[in-house]
Image (cartoon, rainbow, N blue to C red):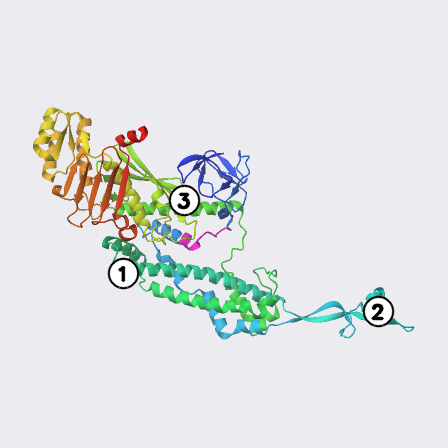
Amino acid sequence: MKVWDRYSGAEADLPDIVVPGRFQVLAPCTLNGHALMNKGDILWGDGNVKCALTGDRADRTFAPAANWPAGVSPNALVDEAVGAVTDQLETGELPSPIMPSQLEKHFDLLDFERLLADLLDAGHLQSISQRPRLDMRYDVEVLPVSRARRPAPDALTALASNSQDWSRRRITGIVPARLKALVSEDEHAIYENVVFARLVDRVLTLLRARIHDALQLLEKHQEAKLLSDAQQLDRRLRQDLCTLWGQSFVDNPEAGTRAHETYEALIKLHRKVKQLQHKGLYTQIPRKSNLPIALRNTNILQHDPHYRHLRPIWLLAHAGADREVKTPHQKFEAAKAVGERYVTYVELLVRRALFASELVKWDDVGRKATFGPWELRLAGQMGGCHLELFDGETSVDQLTIVAGWQGRLNWADQRDNYYVFFCHDSEATADGSGDASVLHPLQFYSVERVRLAIEKWLLKQVLSRYPFRVTPLPADLQTAIFAAAGDRAQKAGHGIRFCELLKPDVQFEVEAAVRGSTANELTKKKLLESLKLAHVLGTCRACGHSISPSAFHGSDHGFWANCGECGAHWTLRIPHGTGAKAEYLTGKVSRPFAEVGCRELTVSWSTPLASSNHGKK
């Protein structure tokens, strides 16, 4: 069955093991008999192992990730953060895409945790574990007469029918050697004790999840503090990261301290409850003894001084449990909704990146910007979004951004015009700076990564056209341009070539000469476009400063430029017969992404001559 592979951007055969969220169907179909899918819809999991599509006779299954229960994901805290960020978009503002303030609720102990702490401090749970209520259970066993204390009701019948239990036979009767007797045993697995054991299990599950979330938040707060104090970071990167962070926690600067206190309290609770699991009553209750969420009313649970505390904490511990069993269709719709939220989040990252870029003036209301002679437009699509450059109404190029679900892709393996970002990592390896293309609200470098991708794509459109040639030109126009620009413009056959920047007043004269010339409209358009493209190369992408023409030195084989404001410099090399390469650096030597973010980049591409030489080889 043919599908569209969103991660590779190509049509492919649907594999036997289907990764949920990766493929789009190319024809209307039904998933597992319940989910109607139109052409272009994304194939999500529905909680079933089987993946049966109408018109497909192959036996396919979902990858294990698709079999998670509803509401469970690789990282529920990430999903919650994505939802919190996207909900803020409804206010019409552009929220910070990292660490939403709604996560502050995880910095405080829950009612359930406070009650648990009180019960442990008062010793109620420890008392139940050490001195539980018991019942008497009588088991039937065949024992030697010397050990039998209480004969079973059918002891005589069993003795009469089993001669092997006789010692000897007299005229008056039988002398037994073994007797069927009742043996008394303490019964630990009474209803109230099963409640205690299953409560311990539930509490440990909840505490583990809370500790995991609290630890993530604590680590992020510690990471934010390290970033704010890191002297090795580029000051602009540090300022941008702290601005995004501060936008989320401007009203709660002490959130980090509270996160640490909460984490320590949860660890302490977990340690105490864990002790109840390894000794005492818990070890006597079979693991298979389960209970419904709704408890029965018993005298012990109502009146015992220790057991009566079990019901309140049981209710709090199960308050968030989903008592309604979701259908496969409901699970499919839930997975689809979570995926759509991440698409909205990725689009927010794009808008944030364009808003921060020094290369464009972003109009967030109109979702567009001017870049050189072109117009840049942002549009949504199924499972992602795309940026497109327009020359009038003619498309120049397009950058596609796919919002994936779970996976990883090395940044170096991303294509210049097709990027795939993931909400969840498919591996446990930490991705501190987004090098695995996993971008979410707990990733501080998300905006930097997206900005790097966008600006690299934009600059490639300009750099690949350098030097800017326009030919042929009317002789009078060619003469007029040389008269105004001097040696900053070179002759190229019957046309002209721009390798250098022009001063503002000189550029004004050249533009006036072009508009007043007898050249056709297409030639005029190309000349004016060349001047605007040259202006883009004269703009420092690190600070936005337009450099002086004297700081830009160009030729047919590339250029070298330096920003007098911030010290950044950028170069383009076009060796004869090999591919071109451009570098944007903040200093004399290259620095890692974690220190400078998107402010340094490398763009390379094959020139026509290099491509032909490669073909000859």
Residue visible at 50% across and 68% down?
273
* SS state under label 3: strand
Query: Label 3 belongs to which residue?
Result: 404
Distance Cα–Cα, label 3 vs label 1: 33 Å
| Magenta highlight on residue 78 | yes
Instruction: Give the image location of residue 495, x and y in percent.
Output: 15, 27
Choose between 575 and 25: the one closer to the eye: 575
Residue visible at 25% across and 44% down?
362
Label 1 CA crowd tier, 10 Å (few <14, some 14–19, many 20+): few
Instruction: Give the image location of residue 604, x and y in percent.
Output: 27, 39
Query: Label 1 belongs to which residue?
Result: 229
Query: Label 2 belongs to which residue?
Result: 166
Magenta span of residues:
69-80
Distance Cα–Cα, label 3 vs label 2: 78 Å
| Magenta highlight on residue 133 | no
Label 3 CA crowd tier, 10 Å (few <14, some 14–19, many 20+): many
Residue at the farthest right position? 171
Instruction: Decide which of tag 3 and tag 2 comes sooner along the chain.
Output: 2
Instruction: Give the image location of residue 562, x and y in percent.
Output: 17, 45
**Residue 284 appears in the figure:** yes
Label pair 1/2, CB-CB below 8 angstroms = no
Looking at the picture, does residue 609 appear above or below residue 142? Answer: above
Label pair 3/1, CB-CB below 8 angstroms = no
Please indicate whether residue 357 sits to the left or right of residue 260 in the image. Answer: left
Residue visible at 79% across and 70% down?
179
Please indicate whether residue 559 sits to the left or right of residue 98 in the image. Answer: left
Distance Cα–Cα, label 1 vs label 2: 89 Å
* SS state under label 1: helix
Looking at the picture, does residue 360 appear above or below residue 298? Answer: above
**Three-letter code for the amino acid on which mark 3 is drawn:** Gly
Comparing marks 1 and 2, which lies closer to the viewer?
2
